[in-house]
Each structure stands twice: as structure tokens, then as C-alpha cells.
Image (spheres, rainbow, N blue to C red):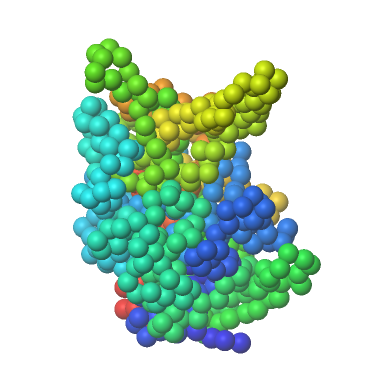
């Protein structure tokens, strides 16, 4: 059996940062990641391959998307080397200082035992390693990105702060879409990388290596430092022994499409164990193995939040026609041009009331092929093609001498204005972290009271509607909202930090109360929503936690 100074379970924003820091300090590190590697060019785009790109090992699916469904909420997380960085939208925003709150709410408290000042050096360290840079709007073609300009205009009209957040994306120096990046194949995939091609595919995995995801940054450096990175290794159990911990995992075989052999169980030893399997993964593992850790805090499973995630849509946007006052023309927003997110506007908290919790609204892009799915749907396309064929048939019957049919083909294709004048809006902020996770028949379940966050989501809806109207567009909220149901891509909480075991599962440095050597470094330790995209704060907390582990060692 292999024995390591530290075993890290998971390779997301907490696990990757921790693995690098400990390996850099000279510790023997093993990373156990349940998913597989996704080098550039391996992210599926075809319907056949995309259908298999989900995580469900019981069904022999070892893909990237892991969908969790509960009674009032659905959540999408990632499985693969690099965790959520494979599918996130690259945004790195520091949690505003005034959002590190100490507030009571119906059913509990949101109490942050760390401060913005304490996290500042760790924010800076993470931004440096992730190669964070802002969208380069000072040069073409970036300067004329329609959705970026539209968000800035909406913020100005509504009197809201607007910013270009730092992105973990390489645009090149100087910025040139698709240009080869310096460093060549100096990464654990040994794959060349190229500057962002502005095709809106960040959330599907970047096939050009333009995203500075964790496999290209922290994990590549950890690999060079000697960390043992093992993929398709799904941790199922762990226990304490006098020398530290024993960690048991299943080694999956994802090769080929035929019958695969059953997974093989392995065990490794660890003097220190760091759980970084994500909000759901870590909470589930702790609950499944609670008999081996009976002194775990009663706070396990509490403080769940969806980080205020909400989806809205601007559609059929229009702008004034310069030459004819009072007349309007379609306003092109082109959401498929650029990375998924380029800019954000912020509604700050003014007090502690239910409508004063604060949130961000960001522009959202998507791959261009989705435009075709929307515009050229079967019914619409068949109607256009039928008209084109009737015209050609009539010309044949009447022997009309007209050989140029460009206009007819143009009509058959359609104008494509619905998608060109639409823009998804991504909202996130400070919903009420009153969710509780628990096991039901061996499966993870969630009890989350949406009513406590109604005022927050109502204000989010009103602001998104105002953004839409300021752009001359109509507004539609996520239809799931009408069914009193939400979807999140930023689940947090479940093993929250606190100052005492009554307040949290871990202390402010991620150390599990009552179990020296056992730490948690992922989104589950957050005692409430971050507000902006939580990846940077999760990574900064992991960097801070690594300091304490290294000091103890």
C-alpha cells in the first residue's frame, strides 16, 4: 500500500490549490480524482459524444457533467481533472468586504469567521497562478463586442456599477484570437494552447486550451513537483488509523464503449487527509462515513446555498434608428461572440433587510451552434424549405427564366434575428443559506426553503427586467422559477466553517473539529453564499488553509 504525507480527494478549486501548495512545500502528495483527464480537443461537440458526457458510473458513464436533482433545486457540477474549472465561465471576483457578514435569519445564521483583509494575499496569489486578466476592450475585435457594450450601456442607464472582471483566460500578448500561446505544450496534457477564439464554448470545455483551468495551472505545476495525480479514482470510504488515515477508492476503467470490467478497489495511506470533493461530494462522503467519525459537528449538512444563482433572458432587443427619430431597428447583442462572460454589474447591499442582500448580473454567452438549434428548429425550417421548394416548382412549371435565387435561399435560411438580438443574463448573489443536506435511503437529499429568499429573487427579477428594458428588449425569467424551482451551478455549504464545533464542521482554516489531520478545502466550508462567482474565494480559502497545514507539518 502506498503511503503519502497528504492525500487530496478531488481536483477542483480547493483540491488543486492544496495539492500544489503541499507539493511545493516538499510533501509527498497524492490526488484522487474520480473523473478523467480532458486534454484540449477531447471535449465532445457531436450529439453522439455529448450524450455520453455525463457522470453516472453505475451506468458506465464517466463524462464531465454531474447533475444532482432535489425536490426544490437542481444543481450542475463537474467531474474531471480540474473539477469545476473545466466548465465554469472563468470569472474571478473577490468577495466584497461588506459581504463578510454576521447576520441572523429565519432558521440560522450567516457568520463569516474570516475577513476580506485576511484573504487579500491569498486572492492575489490565486489570481497570479491563474493568469487572471480582464477582457481586452482597448483593441479590436474585443472593443466592439456587442454584449459587453450593451451591459455597460444598461449599467449607465440604471446607475449601477459596471466592471470588467478578471478572467482566467489567455487572450495572448498582444491579444490575437487563435494565436499560439507561449509555453507550447508545457502542461500535464503535453498539448499546445491557443489564445481565446471568442466562440463562447467555455462552459462546454475549451478545445483550444485557452482557459487557464486548473489542469493547466495548479495541477500542471503540482505534477512537475512530483505529486501523484490519479484519475478515475472514486473515493468511497476513509477511516482513522494510528498513523493517520486509510482511504479506499474504486479505480474505474473508462476505455472504449463496450463491456468494461468492474471497478477495482484500492487503498492508500495518508498522514493527512484533505477532502476537496465539492459541496455535494464532501458532504456525502462525510455522511456516509460518519460512523468512523462520530464526533463530527451537528452542523454537518447545514448552511447550504445556491449562491443566489438565477437565469434571465433579454430577447428581441431594439435600438433607436439614428436617421428616423421615433423609429427603432433590431439591436444586435451576438451572445456567441467572446468568452461566455465578459462584464458584470453589481447591486450592492444597503442594509441587512431581505431586499438588501446584494447580487451581480453578468452577460452570458453560449456556443454558436445553439443559435442554429433555436433558429433552424424543425417546424420553422420545414416551413421555410417548403416555401422555397414551392417557388422552385412554380418556376419549373411556368418556365420562368430566373437563374439567381439568392433571395429565395435567404428567405429559406431566415434572418436569425431572434438569437442575434437575445442575451442570457446570469445572476448570482446572497440568497439565504438555510438549506440542509441529509441522507435518505443512502442517497443525498436536500431540504431548502425557497420562501426565505423570495425577496432576494424578486429584486433580482426586477433588476434583470430593468436591464432588458434599457436595451429595448423584452424579458423572460427562467421558466423553472414559475414552478418554484431553481437550478444552481454554484452550490456551497454543507460542512461550514465556524469558530467552535457548535458553529461549524471546520475551523476558519478548514481543519475538521475533533480530528487533527483531517481538513476540508472546497465550497462546502463556506458558511453562506459568496455573492459573486465563488471559485476565487474557494481557492483563496484553500491557499490559506494550506499555510496552516504546512506550518503544522
Residue 93 spot, x, y in % from top left: 30, 51
Q: Is residue 330 above or below residue 272?
A: above
Total marks shown come to 0
Q: Residue at x 32, y 26 (%)?
A: 471
162 left or right, relative to 430: left
Along the line of sight, which residue is nearer the eye, 374 or 528?
374
Q: Residue at x 46, y 72 (%)?
A: 191
Along the line of sight, which residue is nearer the eye, 501 or 311?
311
438 left or right, relative to 85: right
Quadrant of the drawing holding the N terminus: bottom right
Along the line of sight, which residue is nearer the eye, 288 or 404?
404
Quadrant of the drawing holding the C terminus: bottom left
Q: Residue at x 40, y 77 (%)?
A: 186
Question: In this view of the protein, can residue 359 be seen by the observer?
Answer: no
Residue 358 spot, x, y in % from top left: 31, 37
315 left or right, relative to 97: right
Residue 149 spot, x, y in % from top left: 27, 37
Check the image and name the residue furthest to the right.
259
Residue 80 spot, x, y in % from top left: 54, 64
Amino acid at each position: 500500500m502506498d503511503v503519502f504525507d497528504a492525500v487530496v480527494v478531488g481536483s477542483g478549486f480547493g483540491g488543486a490549490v492544496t495539492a500544489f501548495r503541499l507539493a511545493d512545500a516538499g510533501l509527498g502528495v497524492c490526488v484522487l480524482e474520480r473523473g478523467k483527464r480532458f486534454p484540449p480537443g477531447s471535449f465532445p461537440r457531436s450529439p453522439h459524444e455529448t450524450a455520453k458526457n455525463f457522470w453516472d458510473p453505475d451506468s458506465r458513464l464517466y463524462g464531465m457533467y454531474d447533475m444532482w436533482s432535489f425536490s426544490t433545486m437542481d444543481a450542475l457540477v463537474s467531474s474531471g481533472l480540474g473539477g469545476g474549472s473545466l466548465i465554469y465561465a472563468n470569472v474571478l471576483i473577490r468577495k466584497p468586504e461588506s459581504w463578510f457578514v454576521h447576520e441572523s435569519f429565519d432558521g440560522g445564521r450567516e457568520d463569516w469567521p474570516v475577513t476580506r483583509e485576511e484573504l487579500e494575499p491569498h486572492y492575489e496569489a490565486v489570481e497570479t497562478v491563474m493568469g487572471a486578466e480582464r477582457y481586452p476592450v482597448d483593441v479590436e475585435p474585443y472593443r466592439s463586442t456587442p454584449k459587453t457594450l450593451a451591459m455597460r450601456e444598461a449599467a449607465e442607464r440604471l446607475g449601477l456599477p459596471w466592471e470588467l472582471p478578471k478572467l482566467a483566460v489567455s487572450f495572448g500578448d498582444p491579444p490575437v484570437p487563435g494565436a499560439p500561446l507561449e509555453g507550447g505544450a508545457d502542461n500535464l496534457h503535453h498539448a499546445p494552447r491557443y489564445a481565446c477564439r471568442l466562440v463562447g464554448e467555455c462552459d462546454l470545455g475549451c478545445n483550444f486550451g485557452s482557459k487557464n483551468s486548473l489542469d493547466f495551472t495548479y495541477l500542471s505545476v503540482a505534477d512537475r513537483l512530483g505529486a501523484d495525480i490519479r484519475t478515475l479514482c472514486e473515493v468511497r470510504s476513509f477511516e482513522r488509523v494510528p498513523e493517520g488515515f486509510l482511504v479506499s477508492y474504486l479505480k474505474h476503467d473508462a476505455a472504449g464503449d463496450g463491456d468494461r470490467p468492474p471497478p477495482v478497489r484500492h487503498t492508500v495511506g495518508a498522514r493527512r487527509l484533505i477532502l476537496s470533493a465539492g459541496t455535494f461530494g464532501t458532504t456525502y462522503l462525510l455522511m456516509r462515513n460518519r460512523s468512523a467519525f462520530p464526533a463530527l459537528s451537528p452542523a454537518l449538512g447545514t448552511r447550504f446555498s445556491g449562491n443566489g444563482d438565477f437565469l434571465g433572458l433579454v430577447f428581441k432587443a431594439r435600438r433607436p434608428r439614428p436617421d428616423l427619430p421615433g423609429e427603432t431597428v433590431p439591436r444586435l447583442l451576438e451572445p456567441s461572440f467572446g468568452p461566455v462572460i465578459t462584464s458584470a454589474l453589481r447591486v450592492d447591499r444597503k442594509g441587512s433587510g431581505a431586499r438588501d442582500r446584494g447580487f451581480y448580473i453578468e452577460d452570458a454567452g453560449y456556443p454558436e451552434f445553439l443559435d442554429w438549434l433555436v433558429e433552424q428548429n424543425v417546424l420553422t425550417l420545414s416551413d421555410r424549405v417548403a416555401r422555397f421548394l414551392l417557388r422552385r416548382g412554380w418556376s419549373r412549371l411556368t418556365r420562368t427564366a430566373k437563374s439567381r435565387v439568392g433571395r429565395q435561399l435567404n428567405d429559406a435560411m431566415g434572418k436569425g434575428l431572434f438569437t442575434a438580438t437575445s442575451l442570457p443574463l446570469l445572476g448570482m448573489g446572497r440568497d439565504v443559506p438555510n438549506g440542509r443536506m441529509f441522507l435518505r435511503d443512502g442517497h443525498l437529499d436536500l431540504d431548502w426553503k425557497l420562501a426565505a429568499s423570495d425577496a432576494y429573487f424578486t429584486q433580482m427579477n426586477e433588476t434583470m427586467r430593468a436591464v432588458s428594458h434599457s436595451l429595448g428588449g423584452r424579458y423572460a425569467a427562467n421558466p423553472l422559477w414559475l414552478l418554484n424551482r431553481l437550478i444552481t451551478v454554484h452550490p456551497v455549504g454543507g460542512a461550514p466553517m465556524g469558530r467552535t464545533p457548535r458553529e461549524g464542521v471546520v475551523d476558519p482554516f478548514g481543519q475538521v473539529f475533533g480530528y487533527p489531520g483531517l481538513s476540508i478545502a472546497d465550497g462546502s466550508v463556506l458558511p453562506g453564499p459568496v455573492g459573486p462567482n465563488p471559485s476565487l474565494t474557494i481557492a483563496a480559502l484553500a491557499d490559506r488553509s494550506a499555510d496552516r497545514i504546512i506550518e503544522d507539518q
